[in-house]
Image (cartoon, rainbow, N blue to C red):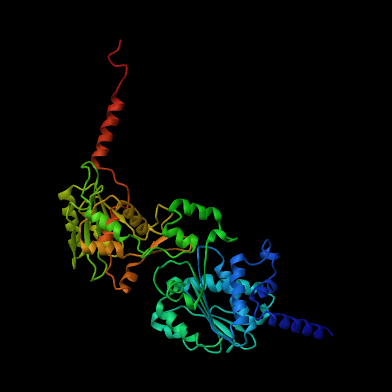
Amino acid sequence: MTATLEKTAADHLVEDIASFHDDPLGFVKYVFPWGEGDLEGHTGPDTWQEELLKDVGKHIQEGEGKSYQHACASGHGIGKGAVTAWLILHQMACRKNLNGVVTANTKQQLETKTWRELALWHSRSIIKPWFEWTATKFYHVSSPETWYVSAIPWSERNSEAFAGQHGEVLVIYDEASSIPDCIYEVSEGAMTTPGAMWFTFGNPTRNTGRFRESFGKFKHRWTTRQIDSRTCKMTDKRKLEEWVADYGEDSDFCKVRVRGLFPSASSMQFISGDLVDDAYSREAKCYLEEPLIIAVDVARFGDDQSVICYRRGRDAKTIEWQTYRGVDTMQLASYVSEAVRTHQADAVFVDGGGVGGGVVDRLHQLHVPVIEVNFGGKAEDSRYQNKRAEMWGNMREWLQRGSIPRDQELIDDLIGVEYGFTPTNKIQLEKKEDMKKRGLASPDLADALALTFAYPVAPKGMAAHRGEMAKKRRSYNPLAGKR
């Protein structure tokens, strides 16, 4: 009798789930224990999530087997991961022998965010026993070889890993703005399958590429939506308003991270071309009492160059910079020592990473008061991921009033570096290795200039002046000479 009742309950569940084939919103409301356990205080999907799920249901009802492509650009923290998990669970439950693939902008994002979110919602669902979650595959327990969704990190060298989908097809991209066009092109092939579904989600970080074109050139092929984080239930409204106050409503930062809008052209450039043009066109002006700073960027690889850079206040133009290729650490240290003696520098900052440590050690032996700087070290400003990003941030601000040499290599260095954000919203710069993959040179000249902003520097004379004033204050007797 008990077995019969259990079978009947299971049959009822199968029938109920089947009824949600064209109603993903109803499915989401049905399979999760809203208002209970760790969903206490949550009554169901957010408004934008409901609208998206309704759009999907409408297409299933009216699409007559046509493929469906949905692109969603949004600000930060709106619940994209939850929607991704719901879509996977709905499609897996309602489409027999589904063949799905999920990818993200990075392997870490895929494993620790997107795929983990699926595990979380799977564990909450009433249909948990139907499926098995592993680190790379989510499958139906009755047909693990034919009914599954795979988590696959993308690779331009192995783009064909996304090819060959057939039958009941589902494709999902997380942080789609950073997924290259060649991966999109492979996924397009799967859209020839009747009923195939393709969803792309992400912060609209880049103004180029196929994710952007989903809202422009190819908009007629996609259902699109752009979500302002301030309209969503789960976002931290106080933090969002702080960003708006700090960066401005119309800044690229707020467009991308808050408003869900694509940035101005080339906004992923950390430093704009206009800012650099103004800086090299500007007349060099400074005060002689301002500190003279020498910075040294040390070449790491054979095609890089070592750079000695000079800056006094707003002037990084008057003293000619030196560049060297193929010199060893001993030779470079000698050149730096000579530069310090010649120009009477107030501070010397040297990139201590890699072979730079050898230059620092040799300068100490030569009694040069050098300060070693670690590009990967901790930033003092909490907005930045590391010291390099912080120095570049200070340099970018300085370029609004500073002057630089009219050197095309320096100009290319300054405008070539792109930036992004860590999961904790700290600014991080593009790595030199990634720039080289884009066909750009290592930004040695720009890194050298950025090094001059490593730490605040006071002129040597100021310390001596303060010492003399302190002596005078100590020796001064206001009662002297009085009777």
Give residue 403's position: percent from left, percent from top: 24, 52
Give residue 429's position: percent from left, percent from top: 37, 63
**Which residue appears at 41% of the width and 79% of the height?**
155
Quarter holding residue 22: bottom right
Q: Nearer the viewer, residue 217 or 158?
A: 217
Q: Is 224 left, or right, of 95 in this rendering?
A: left
**Which residue appears at 28% of the width and 43% of the height?**
458
**Which residue appears at 31% of the width and 54% of the height?**
395
Residue farthest right in this picture:
1
Quarter holding residue 233: bottom right
Asked if 161 appears above or below 303 in the picture, the reply is below
Q: Tell me, yes or no, if residue 144 can be seen here.
A: yes
**Which residue appears at 32% of the width and 60% of the height?**
272
Q: Is 240 left, or right, of 470 in this rendering?
A: right
Q: Nearer the viewer, residue 1 or 285?
A: 285
Give residue 385's position: percent from left, percent from top: 41, 59
Asked if 175 appears above or below 477 in the picture, the reply is below
Q: Nearer the viewer, residue 218 or 306?
A: 218
Q: Tell me, yes or no, if residue 350 can be seen here.
A: no
How many numbered discs sit on the rendered protein? 0
Q: Is 37 left, or right, of 294 in this rendering?
A: right
Quadrant where the image shows the N terminus: bottom right
Give residue 213's position: percent from left, percent from top: 43, 73
Quadrant where the image shows the C terminus: top left
